[in-house]
Image: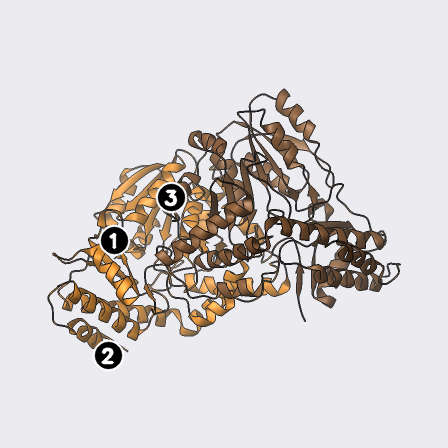
Chain colours: A brown, B orange
């Protein structure tokens, strides 16, 4: 059976990038590899829209989330964590593991945080050293207004803004420097169109000030080690050579398409997906949906677990289900990375057929019709 | 130019394993992937010669070294670190980062620790909670008598033995359970014949006792999370899918050849290499050399940095130089993983030609003659 991934990580990897993965291993301390790594680092700055260094870690995205916490804070310090889903909660768990006093900002799953609330809390609570949030909360598909929060953070000279952009960077606009984002995090298996195994982290000048004084223990994730090595286009620990060759290839194609075009492409695909599911009488979970993935409420009378199972087993189409409290209640169609218009047609076609088989009542083709309407208009 | 890696990581990757790296990405939470991961975990138990779980981390070997420290100890506890090279020193650095009181056992670089000294220190110093050591110290090629240290550790019910076997497991005998090794660590880019990006860590029952009570902060490297996921053949964080497909392939070939045969093969290759360099009038660095890599002193009158540079640039042959205080003073020929007899002939041939060009006096072919003598005898 042909298999198609529409999960918010891992995402499909282009064939030419996969072939890079099969190249013979070269040593990481050779001119040949260092040139490739140096070019990849420049490509990452372009993707992150930053002049600051972007570090490459051999870890999942969570490793970079932990690095953000353990490198900038000290025991007992206070952090504001915006919690509107699983990955907001993960920031809280990481902070708690390190003895950070978490001020939680609970947001209903599916809703977006109001930036003015962030400002209010930062003003009321004294000494919040960092705000942890997501650009797109992968578990709900909600987009956070990071630009506005970045504007607010500017007024707080002793507070950093750390953004988990794992399921969004390279699909949704994220202007690291222009928006005053101190640390932006992503992973390889999302919009970067790579296999899992790498994470990435940008660090602002303001963040370095805190890193110099951080008293939390770390070694493998110690960013000072990475900065020192980066000066020589090197890594403190043996890097995943194959993944970095693939990264270079992928970043080349990102540069060729251009970030603004990539963002526009994702916007069209997301709009088509949203139009399609609405035309099928389905409801979106996210109040403000991100363009990287679409979370859809499972309609009454349909078993959500059965729906994603059927899509996978009968059609080879892998949508993500809901996580934790949303298990069985939503499904998520990811369209970040290596996706085009016809992938959306295919995904909606699979959804229509599976829904029909499960007894959901709608006019066959109604979703495709709505999607095609959007896909034809925007170009 | 054809390029050949004789570095102690990364090592050459077999062609069929490289092709696994190029396979389309499958989602990690599918029956297809979980089956492969489950088989890889069984293969790791065979390789580690343990009945206990072996965890797969997305990190370099250093990540697993840190996991060993941060999962079993608590702030202020005492650890004995055997320091006879760069990786012994790394254990000390990691412990110090976490506020562990390090009792260092300094061993001259190139010498092997005397196990009775370990016993003496464990008896004199009270409350040493863990001993950190290397099986083969990658920076010197020295083999530690882990079997004897394992026997000693049995007498100390509150002390764990943690072994960095990064440049040795799968090349040199390492009987995890039989020798009472509480944690054994390796990386993908060594004898496992894989690209860098994964590390592995076995955990004994005795070690779990300490893990339950450890008070050091951790999240991404928290082994309790990995244990909980492993019960469902799952991972707590998105695993590097491609590397795990390749791991499965590599472990299949390891099982096919058989560990005892693999160890015998490495012994022959190492003996041939040692015989060759001695026949060239060169001296080994290691008092007790491991069979995974051979560290050789650069002869008087020859510039060691120039030698490895020439080998790389003129012959495409990548030997490792010396690290830190041994820089320029030694070179290291690795022969762990995907190596056979003719690779040794090739390596010695390159060495002879480069030495000759640099004005070193010896009879051309003398090294090869000695190597072939060994390679012909042992089978």
Residue A302 vs residue A319: left or right?
Answer: right
The residue singled out by tag 1 in the image is: B322
Q: On screen, A172 above or below A214?
A: below
Looking at this view, is B217 or B337 the one in front?
B337
Does residue B53 appear anywhere in the picture?
no
- Where is residue B379 shown, x and y percent of the image? 28, 78
Q: CA distance from mark 2 to mark 1?
A: 31 Å
Q: Residues within 10 Å of mark 3 (few under 14, many from 20)?
A: few
Q: On screen, B29 above or below B356?
A: above
- Where is residue A314 shown, x and y percent of the image? 74, 67
The residue singled out by tag 2 in the image is: B376
Q: CA distance from mark 3 to mark 2?
A: 48 Å
Whichever of callouts 2 and 1 sits on the residue coming sooner in the sequence is: 1
Residue A68 vs residue A228: left or right?
Answer: right
- Identify the image quadrant of the N terminus of chain A: bottom right
Q: Chain of mark 1?
A: B
Residue at the spot 51% in from the left edge and 68% down from the top edge: B20
- Where is residue A311 shown, x and y percent of the image? 74, 62
Q: Chain of mark 3?
A: A
The residue singled out by tag 3 in the image is: A231
């Amino acid at each position: 059976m042909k298999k198609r991934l529409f999960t918010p990580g891992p995402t499909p990897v282009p064939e030419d990038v996969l072939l890079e993965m099969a190249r013979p291993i070269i040593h990481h301390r050779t001119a040949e590899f260092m040139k490739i790594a140096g070019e990849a680092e420049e490509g990452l700055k372009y993707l992150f829209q930053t002049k600051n260094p972007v570090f490459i870690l051999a870890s999942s995205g969570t490793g970079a989330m932990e690095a953000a916490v353990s490198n900038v804070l000290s025991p007992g310090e206070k952090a504001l964590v915006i919690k509107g889903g699983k990955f907001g909660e993960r920031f809280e768990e990481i902070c708690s593991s390190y003895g950070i006093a978490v001020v939680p900002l609970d947001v209903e799953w599916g809703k977006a945080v109001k930036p003015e609330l962030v400002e209010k809390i930062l003003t009321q609570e004294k000494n919040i050293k960092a705000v942890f949030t997501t650009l797109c909360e992968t578990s709900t598909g909600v987009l956070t207004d990071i630009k506005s929060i970045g504007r607010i953070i500017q007024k707080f000279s002793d507070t950093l803004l750390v953004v988990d952009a794992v399921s969004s960077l390279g699909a949704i606009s994220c202007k690291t420097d222009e928006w005053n984002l101190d640390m932006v995090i992503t992973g390889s298996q999302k919009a970067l169109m790579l296999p899992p195994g790498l994470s990435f982290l940008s660090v602002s000048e303001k963040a370095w000030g805190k890193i110099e004084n951080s008293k939390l223990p770390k070694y493998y994730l110690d960013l000072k080690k990475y900065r020192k090595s980066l000066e020589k286009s090197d890594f403190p620990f043996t890097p995943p050579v194959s993944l970095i060759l693939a990264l270079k290839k992928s970043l080349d194609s990102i540069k060729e398409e251009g970030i603004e075009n990539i963002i526009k492409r994702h916007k069209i695909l997301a709009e088509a997906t949203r139009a399609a599911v609405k035309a099928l009488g389905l409801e979106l979970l996210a109040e403000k949906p991100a363009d990287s993935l679409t979370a859809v409420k499972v309609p009454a009378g349909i078993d959500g677990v059965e729906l994603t199972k059927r899509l996978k087993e009968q059609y080879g189409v892998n949508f993500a289900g809901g996580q934790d409290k949303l298990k069985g209640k939503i499904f998520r169609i990811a369209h970040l990375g290596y996706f085009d218009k016809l992938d959306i047609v295919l995904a909606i076609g699979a959804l229509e057929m599976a829904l029909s088989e499960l007894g959901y009542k709608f006019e066959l083709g109604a979703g495709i019709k709505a999607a095609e309407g959007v896909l034809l208009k925007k170009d």
